Image (cartoon, rainbow, N blue to C red):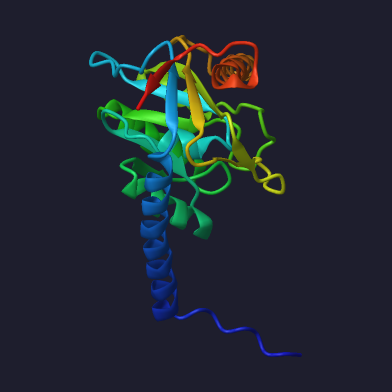
Amino acid sequence: MPPAPEAASPAGRTTRSRLRQLFGVVLSWLVRGWARTWRIRWIDGLPARDSASRTVYAFWHGQQMALVARRYPGPLATLVSLSRDGELQASVMHRLGLVVVRGSSSRGGAKGLYAMIRAVRDGADAAFAVDGPRGPLYSAKRGALVVAERARARLVPVACAARRTWVLHRAWDRFEIPLPFTTVAIAVGRARRFEPSEQGAVELGEAIQHERTRALEACGRGRSTTGSSEP
């Protein structure tokens, strides 16, 4: 029998972790600079942070770049996978100004949701890609509903679309990268309450898709081109 592969040494794991963090710093600079070239159109105006209650924003996977690249007026928590890829993503998100909570539905899921609930109760708003971490794409899960219910927060569907964009078709989430100097439309729906149930998840998915349609129209890929802009 061939000898069993040796486990990675602590020093090797530390080195790889530091390299991922360093790569995260570089990526965050790239994302920030890339996003500064976009013309942002906020449909119905920029969202105002509610000082009286917290908000959980729900959106589809694949649209994270356009949504997290803009500065948010207050602490915004997001759930990131415990995987090694998640470590890189967490490094980027942290340097973009987000409050990063580690966890997933497959490993540490309940712990991650409880940490998100605590973050919202402590004063942060939250951002959830509700069809993850492994899909199926555009099928909402209950995580955001549970956090909003337990933390007594508003739940708001949000979506974006770019007039010109690269789509990574081989990625399960069809990740979208808006091209430099293009128009990016962001549609933020009205706050409402969804039951933390399977039916509530279906209704949340329908609400997100409605905002996606509005964003597509506002950036010129639909019937309407209305919206307010941010330089």
Residue 161, image quadrant = top right
- The vertical placement of 173 against 28, above or below, is above
Q: Can you name the residue that lies furthest to the front here?
A: 181
- Classify residue 121 as left or right of residue 38: left
* Residue 83 in sight here: no
Tell me: residue 139, above or below residue 204. Answer: below
Residue 88 lies, in percent from the top left, at 45, 57
- Residue at the (60%, 28%) spot, across then down: 141
Quadrant in the picture for the C terminus: top left
140 left or right of 230? Answer: right
User: Of 230 and 206, which appears nearest the observer?
Assistant: 230
Q: Nearer the viewer, residue 65 or 55?
A: 65
- Which residue corresponds to the image point at 44% horizontal and 22% vertical from the top-left? 41
Task: Say which quarter of the image contains residue 140.
Answer: top right
Q: Residue 135, relative to residue 86: is it above or below?
A: above
Left or right placement of residue 149 versus residue 120 in this view: right
In percent of width and height, residue 67 lies at 45, 33
User: Quadrant location of residue 123?
Assistant: top left
**What residue is shown at x 30% (from left), y 42% (from top)?**
97
